[in-house]
Amino acid sequence: MEKPQTHPLDFIDREQVLELLSEQLAAAWSSFDRPRPHEAKLSSALRQRLSVALPQAPGNPQESLADAAQVLDASVSPSRPLYAAYIGSTGLEAGVLAGALANAYDVNLASSAGAAELLEEQALRWMAEFIGYPLLDGTFTSGGMTSNMTALTVAREAALPGTRASGVGGRPAAVYCSAEAHHSVVRAVEVIGLGAAAIRRIPIDDHRRIRVDALGDALTQDRRDGVIPVAVVATAGTTLTGAVDPLAQIADLCAEHDVWMHVDAAYGGPAASVPAVAALFNGLERADSVTVDAHKWMGVQKSCSVVMLSRRGALESAFAHEEGYMPHAERAANAVDGTFEYSRPVRSLKLWMAFRIYGAATLRSWIARTLEHAETVAGAVRAHPRFELAAEPSLSVVCFRHLGEGDLDEHNMRLARAVGEDGRVYLAPALVDGRTCLRVCFTNFRTTADDVSELLAVVEEIADTL
Ligand SMILES: Cc1ncc(COP(=O)(O)O)c(C=O)c1O
């Protein structure tokens, strides 16, 4: 008679699966060391298995692991050195170790979770120190979207007290950001009940930064019209071109108009630690709140973002509450009082491990190297008779066009598609001032100078064939 299973782990031979998993991780990691000539294809047998109905009976763990690894290997991974599309990451090994451990313990930071809270607070302090921000409150979130929304919820409560209880109540309010701010700002404003019409998209200057004169005019006009300014969202590293808004001047304006200053540094924030570009971030330290995604330019896995605030207790003012299933011990706040989410994993462990294992100086030098890659590409584009820059790069994003035959928008879109089909290089098409271009963004610490030369050679080779 078969032994009855008493425990989920009875299904698994632990040693065997750990051995297989470590082989798979080693294979994945070594496949990220160098660009591969072609994307892996899913086998037809596995493709067929991906359409079978819900299994009722136990399956073989080794086979499941092997299938899972094959599916992921045939998927687009930002960990590959020639991934320069959108805003990638690195998938640092430290984050893999942290992810495995965090999943094993499955600690929930919604309620008091013991030592993990100390680690989370330390990781927050380290992140703030890394970018030079005077942190007094903050939390890890699932991404830049949630971090921006968290900060704007706090700003809304500061500008329109009592909104939590009774809603905006028709009080006219406004949030200011550059024409090229990330859409998450609009979404956050919609979600927190101000309505997208509250967004003031301020025009940009020749360096694609918010125009401070136009921002000042908009604030003055709104005050005159009885509209309450809730926050100015400065972007430190726009998604499209990497432009950094003039933070010190924005901080002056916010002080003058008594408005909350939030900096969306989801992408660009880590570059504040690099001496070569640190001056661009002057004024960041004066912001009321800042978003930084560790799952972008800090190299750790999704999802791991940080929202930092310079006012103690700011998060509680927006999120704390009293419920019978989570009574407060005397006057102490519950963990969940400072977050939008309830159940919450220890996302900070990935970043904490990265700081512990590599050290801040190493991370800083890897970030500096990705900035150099962008300079290399921009230099090569400037020097090439058949390419042109679509925008001057500020950080690690470069937007450029190939000067082919015919309609250049169609030509560059075809080129972007052809590069995608070729599969050696990952980049994305983008629209700068309505003109189609190719956009690369270097955030992957695995990318070497040789990989950058390869990237350029591949794009040039494919462009010549169109
Ligand atoms: C400037 C900026 N803000 C916010 C976001 C949203 O971040 P997430 O995708 O982590 O929610 C992005 C994403 O690219 C971004 O570039």
Image: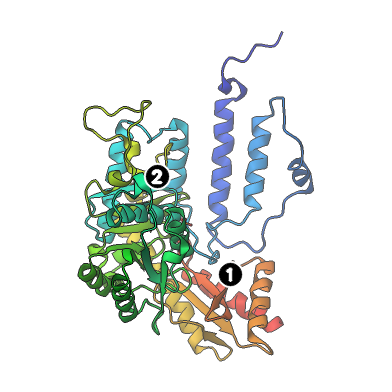
Q: Secondary structure at mark 2?
A: loop
Q: Position of residue 389 (x, y in %)?
A: 50, 84
The CB of the residue at mark 1 lies under 8 Å from ligand 1 = no
Q: Identify which residue, 461 or 178, lies in the foreground.
A: 178
Q: Quadrant of the C terminus?
A: bottom right
Q: Earlier in the sequence, mark 2 or mark 1?
A: 2
Q: Position of residue 129 (x, y in %)?
A: 25, 56
The CB of the residue at mark 2 lies under 8 Å from ligand 1 = no
Q: Amino acid at mark 1?
A: Ala
Which residue is drawn at the image coordinates 54% and 44% (left, top)?
Answer: 25
| Quadrant of the image occupied by residue 298 | bottom left
Residue 147 located left or right of residue 417: left
The dot on residue 340 is 2
Marks 2/1 in contact by CB < 8 Å: the verdict is no
Q: Quadrant of the N terminus?
A: top right
Residue 217 located left or right of residue 183: left
Residue 258 located left or right of residue 240: left
Location of mark 1 (residue): 428
From this view, report whether residue 180 is shown above or below residue 443: below
Q: Amino acid at mark 2?
A: Phe
Pick out the residue farthest to the bottom. Answer: 385
Residue 353 visible in this rendered orientation of the protein: no
Which residue is drawn at the image coordinates 61% and 77% (left, top)?
Answer: 459
Q: Position of residue 407 (x, y in %)?
A: 67, 87
